[in-house]
Amino acid sequence: MTVPSSTPPALNNEDTAPEQRTEVEYVLDEQVGFLLRKAQQRHLSLFASHIQPDLTAMQFAALAKLDEVGPCSQNALGRLTAMDVATIKGVVTRLKARGLIEKGPAPDDRRLHLIALTPAGREAVAQALPLARDITQRTLAPLAPEDQATLVDLLRQIT
């Protein structure tokens, strides 16, 4: 009977049989998608630890966008916050249940429902915005000020 080895598999190209080695190395730590994900994880960790309790980054984005643009349809809010249909539906449902937003018919088209901040929603945004600004500064803190501006400009170019 053979006992399975507890030795981990090869961790580098040199330990791999020649026929299994790749000619072009792919180093995950150098890939833009991986780096963006790590940066996002860092930002979300800062967000979760510094924002008001029970407010997710997605919920904050919806509230902040409504504060910025005023009442809009759920579809428009999803597009403006880069959320897919299912995600924005869940965010809106949770914010409505908390009394932070309300849905009502559009004044000029009764078939269209608009989402708007409630007074409690406006208060939540007012409290969260200074915290969100601080979170952005904490996220960018490892960079020199000119590099912070460059990063934001570059991210805008690829989105």
Image: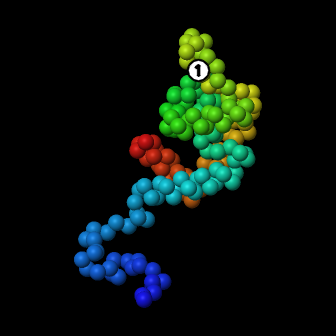
Q: In which quarter of the image is residue 121?
A: top right
Q: Which residue is drawn at 55% across and 30% down?
A: 77
Task: Give the quadrant of the N terminus.
Answer: bottom left
Residue at the extreme top of the image, as rendered: 108
Say which amino acid is labelled 1.
Answer: His
The answer to which image quadrant residue 112 occupies is top right
The picture quadrant where one finds residue 107 is top right
Residue found at x 28% / y 75%: 20
Q: In which quarter of the image is the C terminus?
A: top left
Residue 91, position in %: x, y? 61, 37
Work out whether 146 lies above or below 94: below
Residue lying furthest bottom in this view? 1
Q: Residue 68 location, x and y as percent?
A: 60, 30
Q: Judge whether residue 144 can be spotted in this image.
A: no
Residue drawn at (25%, 79%) of the image: 18
Q: Quick check: 1 left or right of 19?
A: right
Q: Is residue 104 above or below residue 41?
A: above
x and y, in percent, of residue 137 in the image: 62, 50
Q: Say which element carries label 1.
A: strand
Q: Which residue has dot 1 on it?
A: 113
Answer yes or no: is residue 49 visible: yes
Task: Pick the residue in front: 131 or 84.
Answer: 84
How crowded pointer 1 is (Cα within 10 Å; few <14, some 14-19, many 20+) is rated as some
Please give left or right for residue 44 compared with residue 17 in the image. Answer: right
Which color mode does the image show?
A: rainbow
| Residue at point 49%, 55% (across, down) | 37
Residue 129 screen position, x and y as percent: 67, 40
Number of numbered discs overlaid on the protein picture: 1
Q: Nearer the viewer, residue 125 or 90?
A: 90
